[in-house]
Image (cartoon, rainbow, N blue to C red):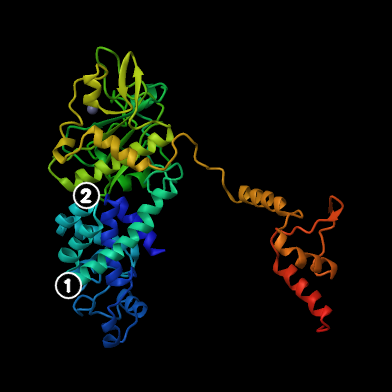
Amino acid sequence: MNEATIWRFLKSQGMTDAGVAGLMGNLFAESGLNPKNLQNTYEKKLGYTDATYTAAVDNGTYTNFVRDSAGYGLCQWTYWTRKQALYAFCKAIGASIGDLDAQLRFLMKELSESFKGVLGVLMTTTSVREASDIVLLQFERPAKMNDSAVQQKRAEYGQTYYNQFAIMAAEKGDGSKMKYTSANPPMKCFMRQSSWYKGAGKTTIRGVLWHSTGANNPNLKRYIQPDDNAADRAKMLELLGVNKSGNDWNHISREAGVHAWIGKLASGDVTSIQVGEWDKKAWGCGSGKKGSCNNGWIQFEICEDNLSDPVYFEKVYREAVELTAYLCKLYNLDPQGTVTYSGVKVPVILCHQDSYQLGLGSNHGDVLHWLPKYGKSMQTVRDDVSALLVGTNTNKEEDDDMDVTRFKELWGEMRKELQDNDSSKYSEEARAWATSTGLIAGNGTEINGEPNYMWADILTREQFVTVLYRFAKKMGMV
Ligand SMILES: [Zn+2]
């Protein structure tokens, strides 16, 4: 369904639940979340339906898409420059003008390039109404946008999406609001040619330690490149981009290594990439006078930009929180907890600078030269990770064994329980009549000397017509 796809996509871009809901309420008001939606008044005027208009634009038989002033797609793009940009974007990636994924990506492009203020709110707000209003007033700008009834209506649409996706996911407690799960782990690009990968042994996992690179280069390709002989080398290079200077970390000369990196792919999308097994000992935070958090702390680097872009910061922060929550769930770690290591009480979640303060790392400032600029700290990290984990029971393993075979087994077990003579008093007369007239027969086995009638079991359509047939016969109808 479009709504779930749209919710997941926008969440993956770093928007808050309220931000996504407020935006989606507006998209619903504009297009009913139908990416092929042609503004209704233009269907008659132009003689097209949603489908025929889309096809005619795609195959070139209709050439006035940009200038026809007809609202189109998820956002009902209308003004010619925006329709022109949408058209160019879809053409460039070889997608139909009505393609949902292409329109979502174009929507993000518009927001991040031309509506940064709107996007900033969508990534931070906890109010559906605030998100809905800013999208309405600054992004969609329809004719009646100042009508308070219109504003309220759109926020109400948004609230229904919030209830449907944000609240239900939390109540279900299945971790479905987390970006990464054991069924959907982060991308992998193991760097087996590095000294770290070859040389580091295993460790016991105790927590998660955040780094940031300390250099202005947000691109993952600066640090990550696939092995020379990796089976997916071509695909990974396409995703990452090629590091032409060859100074990535997948070399024998690199005497350092962390488990994962967060930064930009060639497409500009922010993501996490795992580059080695989580239980490998990191060569990340160095050591202090009491020892090293390399023993037991899973470590990742966030690629820094010039530290002045709030949108990039929100994206990487969100991504790092998601990755940390995933690891906490995977290894049953308490995000607010501490562990005693080397005689020191160490937070389960900490950063490189924290490890230095505890005598368990080298003197680097990361990530505390960056997070406070945007009102974040390692405590907001712990709180945000806890919030993601709410309802997911970290003490229990996920029920990964449920598949069709297992379901059939359970279904069979349940039916077996229902196949006896258990029944309620109210139906006594009816049961006596049905058995005495032969409408219902037992299944051939006996329970306590009585035929087993399986009163609580399900009735198939085949059995149903047989009962009807016996009844009709009895009534002389057949
Ligand atoms: Zn560091």
Q: Is residue 74 visible?
A: yes
In this orientation, does residue 84 appear? no
Q: What is the three-letter code of the residue carrying label 1?
A: Asp
In front of the other: label 1 or label 2?
Answer: 1
- Residue under label 1: 147
The crowding category of the residue bearing disc 2, from other C-alpha atoms within 10 Å (few below 14, some 14 to 19, many at least 20), is some
Q: Quadrant of the C terminus?
A: bottom right
Residue drawn at 60 percent across, 51 percent down: 404
Q: Secondary structure at mark 2?
A: helix
Q: Residue at x 72, y 64 (%)?
A: 427
Q: Along the horizontal axis of the image, is 235 left or right of 456?
A: left
Q: CA distance from mark 1 to mark 2?
A: 26 Å
Q: Residues within 10 Å of mark 1 (few under 14, many from 20)?
A: few
Dot 1 or dot 2: first in sequence order is 2
Q: Nearer the viewer, residue 416 or 32?
A: 416
Which residue bears the numbered disc 2?
Answer: 124
Q: Along the line of sight, which residue is nearer the eye, 424 or 376?
A: 424
Q: Which amino acid does the dot numbered 2 rest on?
A: Thr
Q: Picture coordinates of residue 255 (x, y %)?
A: 29, 23
